[in-house]
Amino acid sequence: MKIKLNVVLVGGTKRAVATLKNLILREDIEILFGIYMPGYEDENKYADELAEISAEKSIKYKICDKINQDDIQSIESLRPDVILGIGVWRSMLSSEFINIPQYGYLGLHGTALPEYRGF
């Protein structure tokens, strides 16, 4: 029996779309939930595309700008192994949220950190 890694996907942008498409193809990964940020006006299309792909694959998701206490409780109840952050997220993520998964929160960033950190 093959064990699946349970993942929550957080973020937006073109990179997140490509990542979601690739994760869906993997037999060793189960995407439990997606939290997608619309970002700036020119980035909205990626949140919409993430939502469309999620709906097609019966992956539950939410589009929002901030992760609130209800979101934290919902994600805790899913018991993810990993939260994977890809692309845009422009609000502070609480340590409570980041510490939910068994193996941690893995955030992918397009530039060197902390020098080019944003929000």
Image (spheres, rainbow, N blue to C red):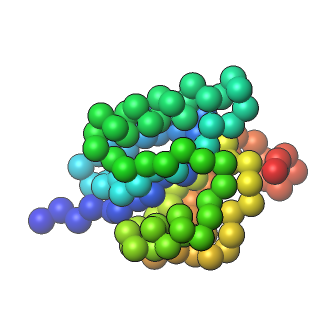
**Left or right for 83, reference 11:** left
Q: Where does the image place residue 11, in percent across and percent down from the top left?
A: 58, 46
**Left or right for 79, reference 85:** left
**Left or right for 56, reference 11:** left
Residue at (67, 74) in percent of width and height: 95
Residue at (53, 38) in percent of width and height: 16
Q: Where does the image place residue 22, in percent across and percent down from the top left?
A: 38, 38
Q: Vertical placement of 24 versus 42: above or below?
A: below
**Left or right for 2, reference 41:** left
Which residue, as the protein is rendered here, is positioned at the far left?
1
Front-lying residue, 44 or 82: 44
Front-lying residue, 17 or 64: 64
Q: Vertical placement of 97 versus 85: above or below?
A: below
Image quadrant assignment for residue 68? bottom right
Which residue, as the protein is rendered here, is positioned at the far right?
115
In this orientation, does residue 28 appear? yes
Image quadrant assignment for residue 55? top left
How many labels, in total?
0
* Image quadrant occupied by the N terminus: bottom left
Residue at (33, 62) in percent of width and height: 5
Image quadrant assignment for residue 26? top left
In this orientation, does residue 81 appear? no
Q: Vertical placement of 7 versus 17: above or below?
A: below
Q: Where does the image place residue 63, in percent across and percent down from the top left?
A: 54, 44
Q: Where does the image place residue 25, in percent across and percent down from the top left?
A: 29, 39
Which residue, as the protein is rendered here, is positioned at the far front?
70
Residue at (59, 70) in percent of width and height: 69
